[in-house]
Image (cartoon, rainbow, N blue to C red):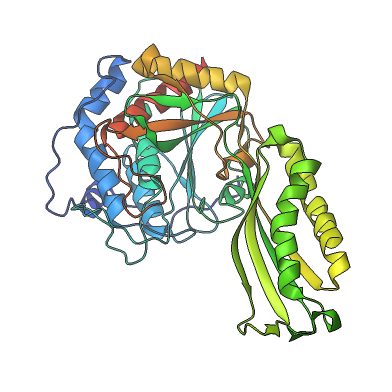
Amino acid sequence: MTVVDSRTDLSREESDVLLSRRGVSIAPVDDPGEGRGPSWLDDWLTANAAEVVAWRRHLHANPELSRKEFATTELIAGLLRSVGLKPRILPGGTGLVCDIGSGPRCVALRADMDALPLQENTGLPFSSTVEGASHACGHDAHTTVLLGTALALASATELPGRVRLVFQPAEEVMPGGALDVLAAGGLDGVERIFGLHCDPRLEVGRVGTRIGAITSASDLLELRLTSPGGHTSRPHLTADLVNALGTVITGLPSLLSRRVDPRSGTVLVWGAVHAGEAANAVPQDGVLRGTLRTGDREIWAELEPLVKELVGALLAPTGVGFDLHHRRGVPPVVNDRDSTLLFRAGIEAALGEDALAGTEQSSGGEDFGWYLEHAPGSFARLGVWDGVSKQRDLHQPTFDLDERALLVGVRVMVHTALAALA
């Protein structure tokens, strides 16, 4: 793999200093899967549950935006080295991969590390200390779960094969840091890949799985219109730009609904429109921006030329000129059947049959889909709601999670890796 080594090597003691709890005491965290084994996993979680919570709180208080996750990367690398592992930093300096175990067979477990450019408003004692940045999508939990999984696996006397840990940067920006991992050979030799994402609609102790599409492709559209402009009393002497904008705003979503399979979950929603200032002047330029999503990989590949065709057809009678920028984002995450069944086996082994939950397809985008173009895999949703307090949605300033979910995540990822290598 074309990965480079880290510039520094943190000892466990140095990492512990970085993981200062800022004077916040951490109460014992209940382990919903306690006693389900294997014994080395139970022992590791019993000894390290409080430390797992401390990792998450440190990461939460010190968020780093996409491709700026340098301190997060160094912290993870130091903790992995402290138990004898050999992490390899990606060429960009953020993100890393690390193998545990030996043998020709290898499965991968992935976590994303980046924060959102969003001001936190939780009031937590370990709230973000970085102005305008927060872990409002739960990536601090994802990173912590995989870190705990890594150190727990490292405590086992023997593993049935290799587990590759993928700590990925830049999930929150398109087309996503998964491409950085792939470009560095991070999935070379991997049979399957698995990932978890926080779900504030599911209670702690439950994990949602789905065969087939679980997220959608997400593209950005920007349409710029041009006109000679003129007076609103004489629209026949110019090209009415605002009327043309309205034609596209209503017409394009309607036409798309008749040109693609309605079962694909394809939806276009406009988020921004601007043209003109004066009520009696036809403006010379305007802009329209929106997102185009679909849950079908084949339709996603066809959308760019189709959208251009339809925009041209809608605007042709208006005389308005246009420039369409179609920025392709990430493909849909389409879970492989066999990988999802292995995931379910891991969840059941970790927590029992009652932990299994279904989940709906989301219209949100997730760059985990890029991995599935290189290896089969499955993506699941980790319940983080305490079942009592108000549900706080992702990407909101008030998002928080029940920290018992961290231990649930560790158990699920460990057991899923073991199931996939069995």
Residue found at x 25% / y 27% = 45
Q: Nearer the viewer, residue 403 or 186?
A: 403
Say left or right for 341 vs 137. right
Say left or right for 18 vs 180. left
**Outermost residue toward the front in this view:** 233
- Answer with the quarter of the image where residue 156 lies: top left
Please say whether residue 38 is visible from this viewpoint.
yes
Q: What percent of the width, then of the height, locates residue 351? A: 35, 18
- Answer with the quarter of the image where residue 297 lies: top right
Q: Is residue 82 above or below residue 122?
A: above
Number of marks in the rendered image: 0
Quadrant housing the N terminus: top right
Q: Nearer the viewer, residue 48 or 23?
A: 23
Q: Is residue 146 above or below residue 247?
A: above
Residue found at x 24% / y 25% = 31
Please say whether residue 159 is visible from this viewpoint.
no
Residue found at x 80% / y 45% = 302
Q: Nearer the viewer, residue 6 or 336?
A: 336
Say left or right for 144 vs 334. left
Q: What percent of the width, then of the height, locates residue 357? A: 44, 21
